[in-house]
Image (tube, helix red, strand yellow):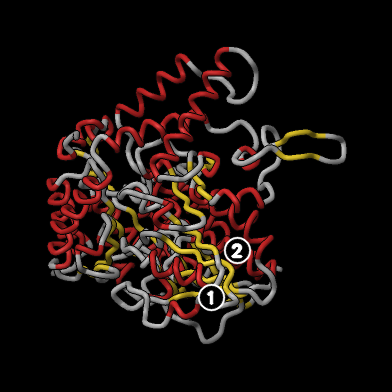
């Protein structure tokens, strides 16, 4: 893959934009996720009220792909119900695993669709999915 | 002596292309490539002498045993061990260190004792000692470094009368620098402690003489010196090995087995349970023969020359920072660095698009990263097949990293 197809403007923008990279004052659940082999490490905070994701943010350090992916994810889950968020996580993971390829269906992922190409880069898949797996764990905790 | 400048021609994999570029392999600190000579040795073995060593009386079992034991003799000569029984063949450096931790550490360290290591250790030489300390009630103490990668003044004083084990890397896999082996070893022996020397990054690159080093244990991996993956070495002084209980239990490490008790085979066999990696041993022997055609001192000198060429040029690139010393004389073919605002994982991907292979991440030395506040870095590492042209391609690619990520300078 060419570098400009990987590091698209959208990804570079989300990587450098820190609006979703912050600490929340109030949150109902926090989850830590990391990739031991490469050192991507993030903590995700989610504030759920009446079954709705009111706010979410992440902190930590990682490569551009992991950071952009976390930021894109937070953009789309805010305001969604927990069930919706679970479904979006599965949709994203399905896209990365190439199980879901229908463009119309993937449009729900908004900016995160830009990470579709990662499925062709086995070495970077785990960077892209880190935030999403972490969210899934967080929401499972929340549901209990 | 064979010329090192031509060595790259011996490695078939270096002929391949990646993304339209000639492959530039600068990750030898992780694993090295395999020359035709070693590939041929394995092929010959598999086609003619493959059998289970030490078992059976037929021709192939006999020839496989011979190949395996000849490899042990070759290793003995390579590191100048006094006795052949002092060479235990393992899977790799990590397994060797686990063997020492479990068979020596667990039985010789007690509550109140100390194990002293440096903060730069590879996890294999760190987590193992954490476990020994946790289990025995001993204390694990770290010797710290200054910004340039040298032991700080007074850190060696941590080796005191309570110390039972002093373990450290001969050459750091991140800093590429050598620790003061002679002084650390003397201090350890003065207080009656044993020295565990991690040679994973030294044995492939310089002449090793375990008797001159006087370390009690010395460990290294075959795959970082042109052999295949899955073969490693644990050297230990004979009297220590004889007193140690076995590590893994099973076939080949026994003498007599009754229903409730077993007497063990003698060293080194009591540490080599199960069918050994004879194929790996064949490649290790061939790799040593291959390297010795150049001479280990010449390999060391050649790598110093490469470092002297690339290090000043790398340091001169804006936004690039090298970990540890910037003095080429102090580096052994391993250079870890960071680039401002770009995560190492992204650096590695961008370099890969130019066919340049480097390592990114914490290099299995998280405490060092935490200590220096550099959780992840890039690491380029060289070997006999590295050419100055490779280094030029690497430097050009490094210069393209920040522009690719949208930075103006």
Q: Residues within 10 Å of mark 1 (few under 14, many from 20)?
A: some
Q: Secondary structure at mark 1?
A: strand
Q: Given the image, what chain letter belongs to the residue carrying mark 2?
A: A
Relative depth, front residue between B227 and B286? B286
Residue under the point 51% across and 47% down: B234
Can residue B97 be seen by looking at this rendering?
yes
Circle 2 residue: A137
Q: Given the image, what chain letter belongs to the residue carrying mark 1?
A: B
Residue under the point 29% across and 70% down: B324
Q: CA distance from mark 2 to mark 1?
A: 36 Å
Relative depth, front residue between B112 and B208? B208
Q: Looking at the picture, how far across and down is residue A3, in whole percent?
A: 24, 51
Q: Looking at the picture, how far across and down is residue B105, in whole percent?
A: 63, 61
Looking at the rendered structure, whether the residues under marks 2 and 1 are on a common chain is answered as: no
Relative depth, front residue between A111 and B208? B208
Above or below residue B21? Residue A49 is: below
Can residue A109 be seen by looking at this rendering?
no
Q: Quadrant of residue B44?
A: top left
The N terminus of chain B: image quadrant: top left
Q: Looking at the picture, how far across and down is residue B258, in whole percent?
A: 84, 34
Q: Which mark is residue A44?
A: none
Q: Looking at the picture, how far across and down is residue B48, in whole percent?
A: 46, 14
Q: Quadrant of residue B284?
A: top left
Circle 1 residue: B141
Q: Nearer the viewer, mark 2 or mark 1?
A: 1
Residue under the point 69% across and 68% down: B136
């Amino acid at each position: 893959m060419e570098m400009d197809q990987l590091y698209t403007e959208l990804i570079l923008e989300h990587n450098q934009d820190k609006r979703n990279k912050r600490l929340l004052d109030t949150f109902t659940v926090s989850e830590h996720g990391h990739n031991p082999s490469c050192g991507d490490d993030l903590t995700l905070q989610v504030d759920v009220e009446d079954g709705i994701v009111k706010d979410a943010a992440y902190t930590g350090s990682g490569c551009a792909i992991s950071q952009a992916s976390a930021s894109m994810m937070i953009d789309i889950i805010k305001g969604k119900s927990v069930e919706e968020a679970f479904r979006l996580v599965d949709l994203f993971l399905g896209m990365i695993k190439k199980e879901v390829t229908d463009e119309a269906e993937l449009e729900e992922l908004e900016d995160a669709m830009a990470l579709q190409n990662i499925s062709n880069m086995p070495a970077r898949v785990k960077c892209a999915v880190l935030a999403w797996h972490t969210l899934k764990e967080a929401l499972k905790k929340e549901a209990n | 002596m064979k010329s090192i400048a031509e060595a790259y021609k011996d490695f078939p994999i270096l002929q391949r292309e990646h993304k339209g570029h000639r492959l530039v392999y600068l990750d030898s600190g992780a694993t090295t490539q395999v020359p035709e000579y070693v590939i041929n040795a394995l092929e010959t073995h598999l086609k003619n002498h493959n059998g289970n060593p030490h078992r059976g009386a037929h021709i192939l079992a006999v020839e496989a045993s011979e190949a395996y034991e000849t490899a042990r003799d070759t290793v003995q000569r390579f590191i100048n061990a006094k006795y052949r029984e002092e060479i235990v063949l393992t899977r790799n450096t990590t397994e060797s260190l686990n063997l020492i931790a479990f068979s020596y550490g667990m039985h010789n360290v007690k509550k109140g004792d100390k194990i002293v290591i440096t903060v730069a250790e590879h996890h294999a030489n760190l987590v193992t000692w954490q476990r020994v300390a946790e289990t025995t009630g001993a204390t694990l103490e770290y010797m710290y470094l200054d910004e340039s990668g040298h032991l700080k003044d007074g850190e060696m004083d941590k080796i005191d009368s309570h110390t039972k084990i002093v373990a450290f890397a001969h050459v750091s896999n991140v800093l590429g620098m050598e620790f003061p082996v002679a002084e650390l070893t003397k201090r350890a022996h003065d207080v009656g402690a044993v020295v565990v020397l991690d040679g994973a990054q030294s044995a492939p690159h310089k002449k090793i003489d375990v008797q001159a080093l006087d370390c009690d244990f010395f460990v290294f991996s075959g795959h970082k010196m042109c052999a295949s993956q899955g073969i490693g070495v644990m050297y230990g002084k004979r009297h220590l090995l004889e007193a140690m209980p076995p590590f893994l239990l099973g076939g080949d490490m026994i003498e007599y087995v009754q229903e409730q008790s077993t007497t063990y085979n003698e060293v080194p066999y009591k540490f080599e349970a199960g069918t050994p990696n004879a194929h790996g041993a064949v490649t290790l022997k061939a790799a040593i023969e291959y390297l010795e055609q150049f001479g280990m001192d010449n390999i060391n000198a050649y790598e110093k020359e490469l470092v002297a060429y690339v290090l000043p040029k790398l340091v001169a690139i804006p936004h690039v920072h090298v970990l540890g010393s910037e003095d080429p004389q102090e580096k052994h073919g391993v250079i870890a660095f960071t680039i401002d605002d770009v995560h190492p994982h992204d650096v590695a991907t961008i370099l890969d698009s130019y066919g340049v292979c480097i390592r990114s991440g914490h290099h299995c030395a998280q405490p060092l990263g935490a200590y220096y506040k550099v959780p992840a870095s890039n690491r380029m590492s060289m070997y006999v097949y590295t050419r100055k042209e490779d280094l030029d391609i690497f430097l050009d690619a490094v210069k393209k990293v920040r522009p690719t990520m949208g930075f103006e300078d």
